[in-house]
Image: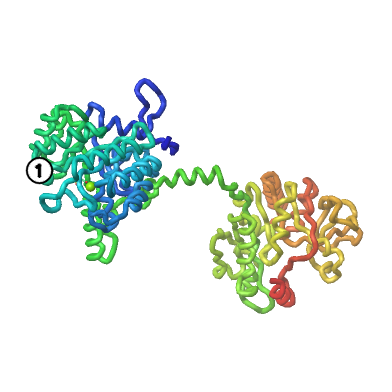
Amino acid sequence: MQDERELTSTEMPAHGSDAPRSRFSRLREALTGPRLSFLMEAHNGLSAKIAEEAGFEALWASGLTISASLGLRDSNEASWTQVLDVLEYMADAVAAPILVDGDTGYGNFNNVRRLVRKLGERGVAGVCIEDKLFPKTNSFVGEGQPLADIEEFCGRLRAAKDSQVDDDFTVVARIEALISGRGMDEALKRAEAYHAAGADALLIHSKLPTAVEILEFAERWGRRSPLVIVPTMYYATPTEAYRRAGINAAIWANHLLRSSVSAMRATAAQIHEDEGLLEVEGRIASVKDIFALTANAELEAAERRYLPAASKTRAVILAAAGQVGADDQPKCLLDIRGKSLLRRQIDAFAAAGVKDVAVVRGFGKAAVTPVGAEVFDNDRWAETSEAYSLAAAESRLNGEVLVAYGDILFRNYILTGLLATPGDIVVAVDALGRLDERRAQARDLVAGEHPPSPDYIDEPPADLAEMGPDVAAERLAGEWIGLARFSAQGSAWLREELEALRAEGLIETADLPLLLTRLAACHPVKLYLFSGHWIGVDTLPDLAEARNFT
Ligand code: SPV
Ligand code: MG
């Protein structure tokens, strides 16, 4: 019922069955089965995980330690719904069943009914309620604490059993007669009454430094119902004595909180004293350990299952070429309304999901240190051309790759369109470039394999025939903007072509239009056509235009 969460390795199969048992039945087994079992205290999700990790089959959600961990006294200062919230974190954190210290039940039978229902609904497998009065006082504070009327307390127990949402929910009745100095006979009388009222187990509590009272009670009770003990004060008693006495479960009631207090005090004092971390670092849990405790690996696996796959496309930006005008700043660092050209490009790639970016530097390279991008250098930038710069980043020309000039600005849709265009090699081409006299002078002009259609929007464009400064007007399809995409196959062809240029002694002088023209001679190079919405920054007027463009 309440056990939908994934079960951990601490889940045990039912007797004679492979089906995992519910937490309710596992707690019932721990508290009422014949073997002595142990419950470890926990007070939040993290301590619950640590207790489970240590191998405890069940946990004790202690009223004392939950209160103390909230900075409160064990006097019902935290409301029961605040405690319930803590319990929910604990139940979410572990598969081990939890017996909650329900104090007095937070009121009368009616409060107990609601408490038990809510506990069951949140996967808490059992509750222990003690025969005292709300607001409770911790058993180790003061003397002669008033006890509840037996009949009234039996009503609380019956109300608890009548409200459980799972048949295996366990109700433990805690007898405080020995604590409050009312003697063994009173304790046994109450045991009898609570057992008859339907308690699944009895918790007999003692604050003596030895187990003498507990062992006498156990002997006189004679195993008529399961017995649970809390050996906080009689801690020196060997556990074997409890086994011999037929005790069913022992609760180590506050030891994770107390040990964490010691550890936190020592760490705080040391760091305060040293004004540094060197002494403590090796002694405390690593951050990695915290990640493991909170199952970060599970989240990473879930991200792989549920998040869209991260783009595997990488980009190589060629930013080796010099300056604009007399400025001694590398061109890629020119400020375009508060952001450098290069930063604008890297951001544009990131916006399209391309986060793996390499930049080839040359002129003024010391200043080119783009955050989030890897850098390669063409130290011979002054006497070499673009193919040589591209070859500097050859190790990145694997898989899907975008290659871009470092001095262009473009609207994001151009990149998105280029990425979406099928083909092993695709070049981004401004179809208006063929109509622009000024541009048609000097740039990377594109010739298609057949004359361009007047209606380039509807007709699939021709493949690239050649690219360069001299293209006959009738073959002119537009102007390459300096942005190309290569598939894994395309980048393999690109590496082959770089190798061929090297072999032919052309690697130092070849520009990208030549490289693309050579590729187009052997492989289809597709055109992605659009109109305008980009700028290449070559001259001072270009720079002014770029600043207006953004
Ligand atoms: C608790 O852990 O809150 C208990 C056990 O009730 S004791 O503090 O021993 O009363
Ligand atoms: Mg308590």
Question: Is residue 118 in sight in this rendering?
Answer: yes
Q: Which residue, given by chain and number where applicable, does mark 1 sit on?
A: 182
Quarter of the figure that contains the C terminus: bottom right
Q: Is residue 58 left or right of residue 485?
A: left
Residue 503 in sight here: no
Asked if disc 1 is less than 8 Å from ligand 1, the answer is: no
Question: The disc labelled 1 sits on which kind of residue?
Answer: Arg
Where residue 266 appears, as percent x and y from the top left, is: 22, 57
Q: Quadrant of residue 34?
A: top left
Question: For the view shown, which residue lies furthest in the top direction?
Answer: 16
Relative to the observer, which residue lies in front, 525 or 415? 415
114, above or below 37, in the image = below
In this rendering, position of residue 473 left or right of residue 32: right
In this view, the residue farthest toward the front is 151
- In the image, residue 441 lies at what x, y percent? 83, 69
Looking at this view, is 502 or 326 the one in front? 326
Residue closest to the eye, 540 or 304: 304
Residue toward you, 456 or 216: 216
In the structure shown, which secondary structural element does the residue marked by tag 1 occupy? Answer: loop
432 with respect to 161 (left or right) = right
Quarter of the image for the N terminus: give it.
Answer: top left
Image colouring? rainbow
Residue 495 locus on image (x, y percent): 67, 48
Relative vertical location of residue 321 with respect to residue 203 in this rendering, above or below: below
Location of residue 93 with respect to 28 vertically, above or below: below
Horizontal side, residue 472 vs residue 320: left or right: right
Residue 342 location, quadrant: bottom right
